[in-house]
Amino acid sequence: VVDSHPERMERGNETRLYKRRWLMLFVFGTFSMSNAFMWLQYSIISNIFVRFYGVNAICVDWLSMIYFLTYIPLILPVTWFLDNRGLRDVVVVGSAFNCIGAWIKTSTAHPDMFAVTFLGQFVCSVGTVFLLGIPSRLASLWFGQQEVSTACSIGVLGNQVGIAIGFLLPPILVPNVDDVEELAYHISVMFYITAGVATLIFVLVVIVFQEKPELPPSQAQAQARSLSPDQYSYKASIGRLLCNKSFMLMVLTYGLNVGCFYAVSTLLNRMITEQYPGEEVNAGRIGLTIVIAGMVGSLICGIWMDKTKTYKQTTFAVYLLTFIGMLVYSFTLNLGHMWVVFLTAAILGFFMTGYLPLGFEFAVELTYPESEGTSSGLLNCSAQLFGIIFTISQGKIMDKWGTLAGNIFLCVFLLIGTILTGRAHLTSKKAISV
């Protein structure tokens, strides 16, 4: 089944947009959603798991940071796998890891099972490596030139929905009760629900997900299909990307921004409960507010970029406003008014989370005709590395000097990223239509 508009014939290459492109995007989004939920299901109620497993806070933080650490050594082989085996195989394998890890965790609702729950989280983190670089590749393979940025934004949106649910549901499913057996029961219920959803998604991926449409959606894809495998070298592509100064500056600034987002997400429970004791549920709701605002920001930015192609200006503006949003959030967190925290968190989330798809699409523009999966992989590798550094560092700063000092630490790096992003606009040698 195809869209009702007529086929286009340009330079002898036939292109067509298929309605099922939206189904592919939905299926991938559900997989991304499930995996992102499991990333945050511990950290948003970290104080409860610290008490349940009898470990210190940094151990629980590592249940989130293992996602970052796993990504760094595995991204290059997974990107090679993507380029050589294709989109479908990568998504199937990734969703399989996601499902297996979820089932491992179902047996860990006991105080002595921290090591096993860490193993399950590690297996889920391997699934993350197979999904983070997919949105831009999926968008280019299935969507037309005027909707690529929007499709990429929607692909990232699935991950954001999972983060939103990860903020919202665990504080509701696992209340902060004193009885260990009752707490174990609630944790077990959460793990089994998660495993059941991951299983359904895996089955859906295997049955429904396809590699690419029969006919390409754009002339760029038509030309890409005309290349023989011998004309593409993965090692040469990596080398060209590493020598692209504008792209490498983009890798650095993207890592700084998204690394700050990862640190805020991982440590949000500690930030809120230190200022507002007993507010675990509201901590989750504040995280939900950050992500929902970010979803709106992502969609608006994606549509704006499809309409205007102002990659440089939009990226810089969003980065600058992220820095300002983080400043406002940091200095109003301790005022004692929860509504102020919700408001400033929404402003921060709109720009910080809204930046995620912008980075993907700007990187594709800077590196065309290199593989979208390779450029996205390097961006995410930077984000994971900075995520580990910022989360550990901010956690230690918060322990010693308090939440405000930890947030100011992130503000400094967002300011550096803003300055470097402005510099990237000046040094970029690639002409981008404005």
Image: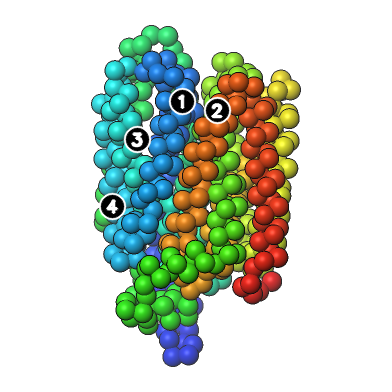
Q: What residue type is labelled 1?
A: Ile
Identified by mark 2, the residue type is Gly
Task: Give the labeled residue for mark 1.
Answer: 58
Which mark lies nearer to you, 3 or 2? Answer: 2
Q: Which of 433 and 390 is in front in this view?
A: 390
- State the colouring used for the structure image: rainbow
Mark 4 or 1, nearer chain start: 1
Q: Position of residue 31 (x, y in %)?
A: 37, 48
Q: Quadrant of the N terminus?
A: bottom left
- Reading the image, the residue beneath label 3 is 121
Badge 3 or badge 2: first in the primary sequence? 3
Q: Which residue type carries mark 4?
A: Val
How far is the residue under mark 2 from the one under mark 1? 8 Å
Q: Quadrant of residue 177?
A: top left
Residue 192: % across, % down: 30, 30
The single residue placed furthest to the bottom in the displayed view is 12
Looking at the picture, does residue 382 appear above or below residue 41?
below
Amino acid identity at mark 3: Gln
In depth, the one of 60 and 314 nearer the eye is 60
Residue farthest to the top, as pictured: 179
In terms of sequence position, does the residue under pointer 3 or pointer 4 come before the other?
4
Q: Mark 2 points at which residue?
A: 395
Q: Residue 240 location in percent, x, y?
A: 48, 69
Mark toward the viewer: 1 or 3: 1
Residue 301 visible in the displayed image: yes
Can you identify the residue that label 4 sits on?
Answer: 93
